[in-house]
Image (cartoon, grey):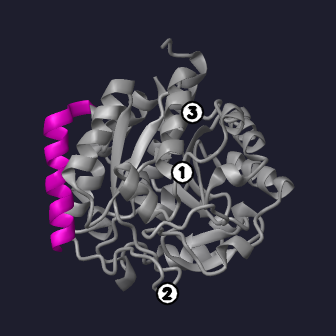
Amino acid sequence: MKIKKSDIVSAVQILKTICAVKMNRRIPLYCEWEVISHCNMSCSFCSTWIRDRNKKEDASTEEALNIIEQLSELGTKMVHLSGGEPTLRNDLPELITKAKERNMIVSITTNGSASIQKMEKILHADMIRISIDGNEQFHDTIRSSPGAFNRAMETLQFLVSRKKKPLITVVYTENTSYEMLTKLADIAKLLNIQVLVNNLGRNINDESGNVDCQKSNDLSSPYFCKYIAMLCRLRKDYGNVIANPNPHLTIIRQGGLDVFGCRAMDIAISIKPDGGVSLPCNGWSKMIMKGNLREIYYGEEAMKLRSFQGKHSICKGCNIRCMGQASALLKLKGLLAIIDSYARSLL
């Protein structure tokens, strides 16, 4: 695929922003945005699940478009739209268009359940990630959604037919078998796309215990040892079909983002479905503030929390991927690995 002039301009702007942050400026280059709380599945491992999630009120179209304007003014160049299930927002195509008009790289993570008609309308997103967690029986069971696997596969095939390069994202659980992962890797290889294998996340923003997330951040636990071994084996067997960039494994091996060096509040901003800014990050909502993004991001409360980013007891062993990737942008090896990973999905 031919590299467009706009892609080069965006890359230069991103590098300039990274240099500015390294020189002690704070710029939210990356935005992690849960654009909707509602979801049509009930995944046993969901790290964003909260009680009454399907009864919550999400930001209106007007509010969401205004958020994109404010992000642009703050210098955001990369935005990840998640949820909930983002395709349940009827205005998702409009949000993507607005972000693209503001020269942002837009990625989406979806469970692949939307109709072909809906998927057709979001093809202008830069990256579309489809969640598939194993074989048909395993995937449908842990998502409490019969038919989910086949629907996600249809979505994958549709996207490939439209010259997109979707990414298969997998959540590795204690019951995930290597055979399941190799079958997904074989599918990816056949379609000339990649697979990203994620570890379980933590859900510390809801303490009801209704989801099977990490119960602790003990990165030396048998679960993480198996995860690392499995990922290394997959990389050996499938090479570049496996998309996991090095920074994430480095963070786990070093003992967590707190050891690696958390810079979430210096280079990223996290937004919740109602439009509120989650401080200090999307993984830990110590407080959620609504209003002018600039005033919140550079405000007194944010500065107080920034003083112990990565240093609070709750941050110990943190391995949240989105904030880890954002922090890794400020280190040369991390930056190069992430650029390589993005390029394979964009080109």
Three-letter amino acid code at disc 1?
A: Asn
Q: Determine which residue is flagged by label 2.
A: 207
- Disc 1 and disc 2 in contact, CB within 8 angstroms: no
Q: Nearer the viewer, mark 3 or mark 2?
A: 2
Three-letter amino acid code at disc 2?
A: Glu
Q: Determine which residue is flagged by label 1.
A: 111
Judge from the rendering whether residue 143 lies leftward or rightward of residue 272; answer left or right.
left
Instruction: Assign a secondary structure to mark 2.
Output: loop
Q: How many marks?
A: 3
Indicate whether 290 appears above or below 210: above
At 67% across and 36% down in the image, what residue appears?
122
In the image, which residues are magenta?
A: 221-240
Q: Residue 238's image quarter?
A: top left
Query: Which residue occupies the foreground of this view, 165 or 134?
Result: 134
Q: Nearer the viewer, mark 1 or mark 3?
A: 1
Three-letter amino acid code at disc 3?
A: Asp
Residue 299 sits inside the magenta stretch:
no
- Disc 3 and disc 2 in contact, CB within 8 angstroms: no
Q: Mark 3 to mark 2: distance in Å?
A: 35 Å
Q: Determine which residue is flagged by label 3.
A: 126
Indicate whether 4 appears above or below 275: above
